[in-house]
Amino acid sequence: METYTFLRAFADSWHLLFMFCFFIGVFLFILRPGANKVHEDTANMIFRNDDKPGGGNTGPSTASHKDPKEAR
């Protein structure tokens, strides 16, 4: 049996089964009962170092830098 034929048969049968079982395992790992706290912590991670609420545009003012040609 050639190497290509063997690898093709392996990929079509056993490797497909392995990848399916791996997918189901990851899916069940994500939905396990104790994972809720981890998911909440991950979702709120970007807000962890906020000291003050955002107050709109905090960047430099662009009102004094308008181009006179824009007014037309």
Image (cartoon, helix red, strand yellow):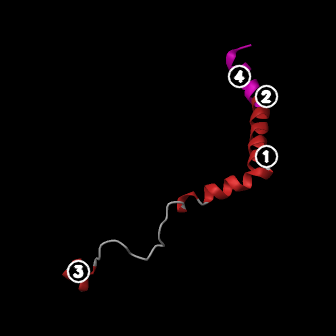
Residue 47 versus residue 21 in the image, above or below: below
Q: Where is residue 27 in the image (x, y as percent from the top left)?
A: 76, 47
Amino acid on which disc 2 is placed = Trp
Which contiguous range is marked in magenta?
A: 1-12
Amino acid on which disc 3 is placed = Ser
Between 68 and 38, the residue placed more toward the observer is: 38
Is 3 in the magenta? yes
Residue under pointer 3: 64
Q: How far apart are marks 3 and 1 (CA)?
A: 57 Å
The residue under the point 23% across, 80% down is: 64
Q: Earlier in the sequence, mark 3 or mark 1?
A: 1
Q: For mark 3, does the 10 Å Cα neighbourhood hold few (<14), some (14 to 19), or many (20 or more) residues?
A: few
Residue 16 versus residue 45 in the image, above or below: above
Q: For mark 1, does the 10 Å Cα neighbourhood hold few (<14), some (14 to 19), or many (20 or more) residues?
A: few
Residue under pointer 2: 14
Q: How far apart are marks 1 and 4 (CA)?
A: 29 Å
Q: Where is residue 63 in the image (x, y as percent from the top left)?
A: 27, 81
2 vs 1, front mark: 1
Amino acid on which disc 4 is placed = Leu
Q: How far apart are marks 2 and 4 (CA)?
A: 10 Å
Q: Is residue 44 left or right of residue 14?
A: left
